[in-house]
Amino acid sequence: MALGRRITRLMKAHWHELLERVETVIREEEAESAARQTARQELEDTLQPIHSTDSRPASSGASSPSVRETEKERALRVLGLPPDADLAAVRRAYRELIARSDPARFPDDSPERAKAEQIRQRIEQAYQTLLLHLDHSAQRFRNLSVD
């Protein structure tokens, strides 16, 4: 009897170990699938046209600073930053988003790669817009003309 109990305990232990391994693999696959779905959703959300949340009526004599301000607000939204973000926060967000939207992560000629390239272009454009507004030294160099 002692041998039978011992074998039963060993089999149960082995069985529970196998069940834990299978459950771990299933959890990892579900997490990977959820991450893929989240990434796909982020790509789709980013590709949606960005609509201005500005509820003010557009006047025919709109000045250039107000137009630039909406460009700045749009650029901040693309990078996922609050309206009072500083240059360091913009650079951090830019580096993080550029790394996350690297088209090289996707197979060639795949729709995900094309979307990642579009997202990367939007991020680049938003970053350049914010540099114009926040980095005053860059603005001075852009205004220089060499003849």
Image (spheres, helix red, strand yellow):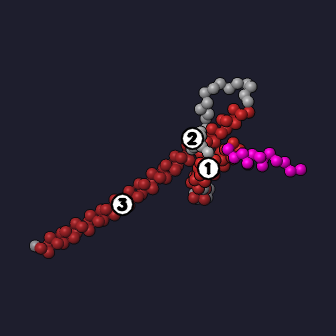
Which residues, given as a range, are shown in magenta? 134-147
Q: What's under tag 3, amino acid-wise?
A: Thr
Q: CA distance from mark 1 to mark 3?
A: 40 Å
The x and y percentages for residue 68 are 70, 36
Residue 13: image location, x then y, percent = 24, 67
Tag 1 residue: 88
- Front residue (pair 101, 111): 101
Residue located 78% across and 49% down the image: 141
Dominant SS of magenta comes to: helix
What amino acid is at disc 2?
Pro
Asked whether, in this view, residue 39 is left or right of residue 115, the answer is left
Disc 3 residue crowd, few under 14, some 14–19, many 20+, Cα 10 Å = few
Q: Which residue is mark 3?
A: 24
- Establish if 48 lies above or below 97: above
Image coordinates for residue 2, horizontal then vertical, percent: 12, 73
Q: Which residue is mark 2?
A: 82
Query: From this viewpoint, is residue 145 visible?
Result: yes
Q: Which residue is at 38% across, 61% downward?
A: 25
Whichever of labels 1 and 3 marks the residue nearer the N terminus, that label is 3
* Image marks 1 and 3: residues in contact by CB distance under 8 Å: no
**Does 61 appear in magenta?**
no
Circle 2: element type: loop
Single out the mark in the foreground, 2 or 3: 2
Dot 1, crowdedness within 10 Å: few (<14), some or many (≥20)?
few
| Element under disc 3 | helix
Give the answer, above or below, for where 133 lies relative to 104: above
**Left/right of residue 19 with respect to residue 63 in the rendered view:** left
Q: On the rendered structure, is 61 left or right of 83?
A: right
Quadrant position of residue 129: top right
Q: Residues within 10 Å of mark 2 (few under 14, many from 20)?
A: few
